[in-house]
Image (cartoon, grey):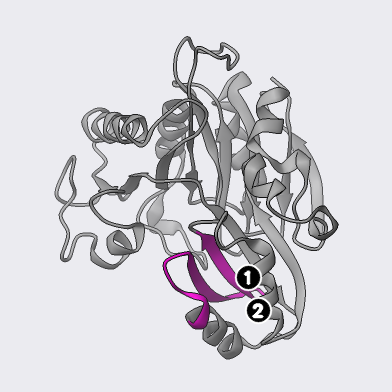
């Protein structure tokens, strides 16, 4: 159930939802700052995960750093994590700088694993852009945060996966940019380049963590990353659908429903229009999807 909406500095309505999931989206359109997307421009999506989801006023202040380039905010207090959807080349850095000034990883507690206050920043090629563009954006952001803010950055994408960083950061893996040790308050950041994915959760009707973990283990594969998590009094199967056009929400929902009753589905952040159109419209409500939840729809509002 959505809490009261917060109107951010960009004039968008941002929902702080006590039962929502953990992942966010940040859109970055290259070119002249603040210009609308046109045929001569390319768009990169960048999913920026902030390690703060409980203090709504703080999240709103950090989102306001994006100004008119804010498209969406998604927060979860149990994960203690927020997702900001932005557009433009300066907004991601403005939000990151504000977050590092305001947040302290030493006092952070939440269900979701994290290595930093600005935890994950993957760049994703969309309209007119390529994976090479995403890699360039990734590298430039990593160089900036390491050089200007002193935060170590781990790279993922062609070289390795985000789970590889989760397992090996500061143990078997050294940062690719910046100091060799975590920033004292900001920790580190994982900066990536990857194809489109869908961050999506299924809440089980019964609070049985063992069942959620078994289901998550069975789902894991090339197209699906999954964790079974205790979130407050409930449990969820928290997922990234890595290739949603091949293995999409409808198929995964049915696989989970064969194993356990489902209370509800939850889209985390946004999805692309082609992924939405690959799902039968009569199932959109069941799967927590809709035309207003797409990247393209949010861009069209600007």
Q: As displayed, is residue 252 above or below residue 34?
A: below
- Name the residue tied to disc 1: 252
- Viewer-proximal residue among 220 and 19: 220
- Residue 49 in percent (x, y) is at 48, 47
Question: 288 and 223: which one is in front?
Answer: 223
Instruction: Find residue 152 and name its label.
Output: none
Residue in view at x 58 percent, y 14 percent: 38
- In percent of width and height, residue 135 lies at 31, 36
Q: Can residue 233 be seen in this view?
A: no
Residue drawn at x 69%, y 48% is: 276
Q: Classify 10 Å Cα crowding around label 1: few (below 14), some (14-19), many (20 and above).
A: some
Pointer 2: residues within 10 angstroms few (<14), some, or many (20+)? some
Q: Vertical placement of 6 versus 225: above or below?
A: above
Determine the secondary structure under disc 1: helix
Q: Please report the bounds of the magenta region as a residue range.
A: 218-241
Q: In which quarter of the image is the C terminus?
A: top right
Task: Name the quadrant containing residue 168.
Answer: bottom left
Q: Report how far apart the C-alphas of labels 2 and 1 lie in the structure.
A: 6 Å
On the question of residue 143 being in view, the answer is yes
Q: Are marks 2 and 1 in contact (CB under 8 Å)?
A: yes
Q: Is residue 154 left or right of residue 45?
A: left
Find numbered disc 2 in the image and state the secondary structure of the residue it sits on: helix
Name of the residue lying farthest toward the right: 282
How many numbered marks have been drawn onto this rendered protein structure? 2
Q: Does the magenta stretch include residue 229?
A: yes
Q: Where is residue 4 in the image (x, y as percent from the top left)?
A: 82, 46
- Please state the horizontal and vertical placement of residue 204, each as a whole percent of the image: 71, 78
Quadrant for the N terminus, please. bottom right
Q: Residue 256 carries which label?
A: 2
The residue depicted at 64 percent of the width and 78 percent of the height is 255
Left or right: 32 in relation to 53: left
């Amino acid at each position: 159930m959505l809490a009261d909406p917060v109107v951010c500095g960009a004039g968008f309505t941002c929902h702080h939802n006590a039962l929502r999931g953990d992942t966010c989206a940040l859109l970055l359109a290259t070119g002249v700052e603040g210009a609308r997307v046109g045929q001569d421009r390319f768009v990169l999506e960048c999913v920026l995960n902030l390690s703060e989801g409980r203090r709504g006023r703080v999240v709103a202040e950090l989102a306001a750093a994006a100004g008119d380039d804010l498209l969406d905010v998604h927060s979860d207090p149990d994960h203690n994590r927020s997702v900001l959807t932005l557009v433009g080349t300066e907004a991601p850095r403005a939000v990151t700088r504000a977050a590092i000034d305001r947040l302290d990883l030493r006092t952070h507690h939440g269900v979701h694993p994290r290595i930093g206050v600005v935890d994950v920043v993957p760049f994703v090629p969309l309209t007119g852009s390529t994976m090479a563009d995403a890699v360039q954006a990734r590298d430039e952001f990593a160089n900036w945060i390491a050089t200007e803010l002193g935060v170590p950055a781990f790279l993922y994408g062609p070289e390795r996966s985000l789970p590889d960083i989760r397992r090996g950061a500061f143990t078997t893996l050294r940062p690719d940019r910046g100091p060799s040790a975590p920033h004292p308050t900001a920790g580190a950041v994982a900066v990536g380049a990857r194809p489109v994915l869908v961050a999506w959760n299924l809440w089980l009707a019964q609070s049985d963590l063992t069942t959620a973990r078994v289901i998550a283990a069975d789902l894991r594969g090339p197209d699906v990353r999954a964790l079974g998590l205790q979130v407050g009094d409930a449990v969820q199967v928290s997922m990234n659908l890595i290739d949603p056009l091949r293995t999409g929400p409808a198929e995964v929902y049915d696989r989970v429903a064969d194993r356990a009753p489902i209370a509800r589905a939850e889209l985390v952040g946004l999805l692309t229009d082609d992924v939405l159109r690959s799902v039968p419209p009569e199932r959109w409500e069941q799967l927590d999807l809709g035309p207003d939840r797409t990247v393209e729809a949010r861009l069209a509002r600007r």
